Image (cartoon, rainbow, N blue to C red):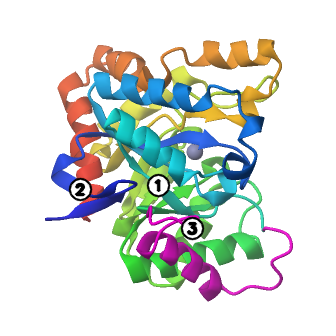
Amino acid sequence: MKTVQTVEGPVSTDALGSVLMHEHICTSSMGVATHYPQLYAEDYEARIVRDLEEMRDNGISTVVDATPVCLGRDVRVLKRTSEQTGVNIVATTGWWGCEPPYVGPTTDEQWARCFADDIIKGCDGTDIKAGILKAAMDREGPTEWKVKVHHAVGLAQRETGAKIMLHTYCPTESPRFQLAALREVGVDMNSVSVGHIPETTDLDFVKWIYDQGVWLGMDRLPIVLLPGSYAVATQTRIKFIKTLLDAGMGDRMLFSHDFMSVSTLYDNQPEEVQEEVRKQCPERFLFLKNHIFPQLAEMGVDPDLLWRMTIENPKRFFEA
Ligand SMILES: [Zn+2]
């Protein structure tokens, strides 16, 4: 029996059910949830429970919390809310942001040890284990730190067998550098999900990614933007998913929203900005099920097939 490590222990891949492969339960800066939860709105844990209950009541059984420690991971909150709601939560290790100040010169191997220990021993001084690895590269490209993170995540993957998810920025083709860095430490591409694919509409580039033998993270649906930012419109993203399905890439698609249940980033915005964010995704973690899939069905895609993809593709990814 193949299993996935969740915050409540290993769960059989047969029992994962419908999975959201890239969401955020609670995000902030490193250490905020564990040291200064006062920076969240007071009811933040109750709001997480409401979101998880809504997922559960709509057939979603498992969620990957794509939040490594530098994005404010709090595995204790993940475990408490998973216990309360019955939703499986997979916690993440690895690194998302810039190089932490004040650690001095570190090696790939030192960081690999940190990430592997999160998976083998437990996170943040608990016995709650991470179940997936994450590395990130954005517009900045392959800086020394970002390459180091990819090497460390790759080494931890080789040691533990846990899968890897990548935060990417496809408009500048960051996956080319990211996959190269992972290959340098011997990672099998079948263990890698390349996330944020809907940030691009470049079919040739996505075909190149697909042909590397990786998985396609179909997240950022919808894209939630603070005022003043810009990205590919949600409607364009939906049409592009149809194009990718027609091109035969559905067998590797891992769907999700990349939505945040609670975040100090939103909780501390002025009320009108919070209202704007709420308007952009009133369906929250049901946007795929209630909005994206029905629109794809109108374009001729079998809705049952789409739902099955949220069950069977994650299972195959975790078993790969
Ligand atoms: Zn994310």
The amino acid type found where label 1 is placed reads Ala
- Contact between marks 3 and 1 (CB within 8 A): the answer is no
Magenta residues span 100-129
Q: Nearer the viewer, mark 2 or mark 3?
A: 3
Instruction: Kindly identify which residue carries mark 2.
Output: 316
Instruction: Kindly identify which residue carries mark 3.
Output: 125
Q: Earlier in the sequence, mark 1 or mark 2?
A: 1
The amino acid type found where label 3 is placed reads Gly
Q: Is 112 a magenta residue? A: yes
Q: Is 75 a magenta residue? A: no
Instruction: Kindly identify which residue carries mark 1.
Output: 91
Secondary structure under the numbered disc 3 in the rendered image = loop
Most extreme residue toward the right is 102
Task: Give the residue displayed 54% in from the left and 14% down from the top.
Answer: 282
Query: Marks 2/3: CA distance?
Result: 31 Å
Q: Between 183 and 243, which is closer to the camera in this rendering? A: 183
Specify whether residue 20 is in view.
Answer: no
Q: Position of residue 53 (x, y in %)?
A: 38, 26
